[in-house]
Amino acid sequence: SAVISQKPSRDICQRGTSLTIQCQVDSQVTMMFWYRQQPGQSLTLIATANQGSEATYESGFVIDKFPISRPNLTFSTLTVSNMSPEDSSIYLCSVVYQANNEAFFGQGTRLTVV
Amino acid sequence: DAKTTQPNSMESNEEEPVHLPCNHSTISGTDYIHWYRQLPSQGPEYVIHGLTSNVNNRMASLAIAEDRKSSTLILHRATLRDAAVYYCILRDVTGGGSNYKLTFGKGTLLTVNP
């Protein structure tokens, strides 16, 4: 199994500001993903974090709003930019090891934008 | 992505078996059937997966219909800690382990009564 540390676990932010969420894994992983879970909803994939190159975004998500970095195989960041109340959600990091059939998820970052 | 259909909610009594159904009538030959669950205030966790044959692990059993158009997750003895949202997800393995994007539906909210 993977030990995934997400920071911060929660935050309350002012609209118009940005927040960077960190995801640290205890060992090298093949794939890292970022998901969003809006209040009372299921999870939606934001993007695949690619090591050493630009992230691959899903439909409806853009780099300017959700810039992602992945400088190595154990670490990634997601920034929520120019926040509005509609960005209030739980943001989750997920990792997959090569040749593994399980995805592991962090505990999530609960973001409230006021 | 092929879609799944699950009941919105189910209820069970502690120490009784629970059968959680999932319909996936448009499943393709390269789709694995995955089950994840999300306990309150936590990220999702892997439960079990299968392709054609029934599968057992320490957490649950997965029964797959012969035509693969439906499956059932079986919890043999429900405990209060099994109360969670259970997601049935189809994962297309075309492209091998590099394709691990998960599309979450609304899942089934399982309530376990003491």
Image: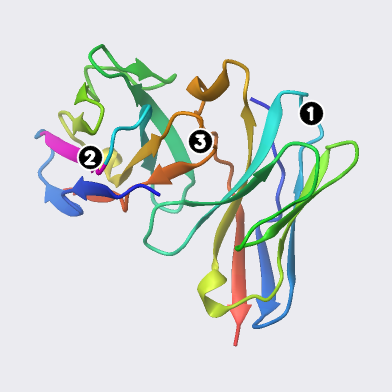
Residue B36, percent from left and from top: 55, 50
| Residue under disc 3 on the same chain as residue under disc 1 | no
Secondary structure of residue under mark 3: loop
Closer to the observer: label 3 or label 2? Answer: 3
Report the span colored magenta.
Answer: A18-26
Q: Estimate the spatial distance between the alpha carbons at disc 3 and disc 2, rounded to whole Å.
A: 20 Å
A19 is within the stretch colored magenta? yes
What residue did someone put label 1 on? B26
Is the residue B14 above or below the residue A5 in the image? below
Residue A23 bears which disc, if any? 2
Give amino acid for label 2.
Answer: Cys
Count of numbered badges drawn on the protein: 3
Could you tell me if the residues under marks 3 and 1 are in contact, i.e. CB atoms within 8 Å?
no
What colour scheme has been applied to the protein in the rendered image?
rainbow
Secondary structure of residue under mark 2: strand
Graded by Cα atoms within 10 Å as few (under 14), some (14 to 19) or many (20 or more), the crowding at tag 3 reads few
Give amino acid for label 3.
Answer: Asn
Is the residue B31 above or below the residue B18 in the image? above
Instruction: State the residue at coordinates (54%, 37%).
Output: A101
Residue A27, percent from left and from top: 28, 39
The quarter of the rendered structure image containing the N terminus of chain B is top right
Secondary structure of residue under mark 1: loop
Residue A100 bears which disc, if any? 3
- Of B23 and B33, which appears nearest the observer? B33
Instruction: State the residue at coordinates (11%, 33%).
Output: A18
